[in-house]
Amino acid sequence: MSLVDVIVVNWNDRENLRAALDSIFALPEIKNDPQFAQVVVSDNGSTDGSPAFLKEVYGDYVHVIKNGENLGFGAGVNRAIARTSSPYIFLLNPDATVEAGTLSELVRFMDEHPRAAMAGPKIFQTDGTVAESRGEFDTWTGAFLRSSAWGQWPFLRRFANGAALRSCDYNNPRKVDLVIGAALLLRRSTLDELGAFDERYFMYHEEVDLAKRIADAGYETWFVPSACAMHIGQGSSRGRSVEGMKQRSRRKYWLKHHGRFWYYSLVAALISRYALYLVLAAAVIYAAIHFVRHVL
């Protein structure tokens, strides 16, 4: 049995998939020990020839699970988890690559932190800048500010969700609420206890939901910068309404973990701000008209 099951969920992303898999097979830890990890591609009904391509290029080195249809990210991962058994599970997006030592560093860290159930590497964007790959669980105020333009105002920005983490050092390990799902390591025993991904999230927020369940159960999520990856972003979302999917998943998360009153009061506040804009606009127009009449 391998130490790590590397799972890549693919849907018509053959263009990026090879770079992702090649980066895995190029890892020194795998070159030196082929039993360190096994690689599984959970294919969500791709029509771009991905399964045939994988068989032709990688043969038996990559195990392909053909789901027959686009089940979404969480369900695609779950199908692969159910057919593997390694102690650790590493999730990698097909539009992401890993740098040397990434898997061994994450495994080492998890071995040294037995309460850690999820760990994410430092993630770079294609231009070399560090991506915001870690976050905080939503508070009502933080969610309101992030979901409106008010969170960009200088005197309110520090109260928006994730503001504290964005300003923190990305060079040292840190216990966080959540890390993004583009590249992350999971402890299988924790998933056996808590369950894997909630398949009601088709795409986006499923890793946030899992991180919340991990935290509620007393386990930990860590950001581990000694492991590094690069993420292009939205490789399997081309042609789809990304923002719409994010909003639907966020709504499911809020209702599940915060309840209807929390969610609908937030929605009411977000809608009410437009009424405030109208009142302010009307006041400005009234003042302008009054000023013009006074001058004339």
Image (tube, rainbow, N blue to C red):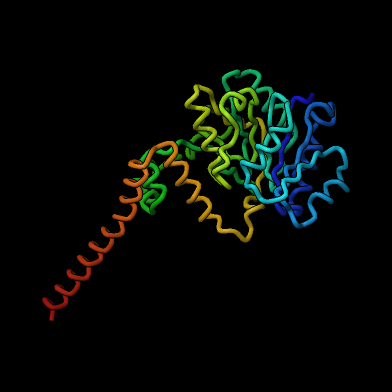
At x 64% / y 47%, what residue is drawn? 71
At x 51% / y 37%, what residue is drawn? 209
Rendered view: 160 above or below 12: above
Residue 94: image x %, image y %? 71, 46
Residue 273: image x %, image y %? 30, 55
Location of the C terminus (image quadrant): bottom left
Relative to the observer, which residue lies in front, 92 or 77?
77
Image quadrant where residue 195 sits: top right
At x 28% / y 61%, what residue is drawn? 277
Residue farthest front in this picture? 68
At x 47% / y 46%, what residue is drawn? 250
Rendered view: 117 above or below 289: above
Rendered view: 267 above or below 176: below
Residue 226: image x %, image y %? 65, 30
Location of the N terminus (image quadrant): top right
Residue farthest bottom in this picture? 296
The tally of labels here is 0
Image quadrant where residue 179 sits: top right
- Would residue 118 be seen by someone viewing this image from the given angle? yes
Residue 95: image x %, image y %? 69, 48
Q: Image check: 194 left or right of 2?
A: left
Q: Image check: 160 left or right of 130?
A: left
Relative to the observer, which residue lies in front, 169 or 179?
179
- Would residue 163 be seen by someone viewing this image from the given angle? no
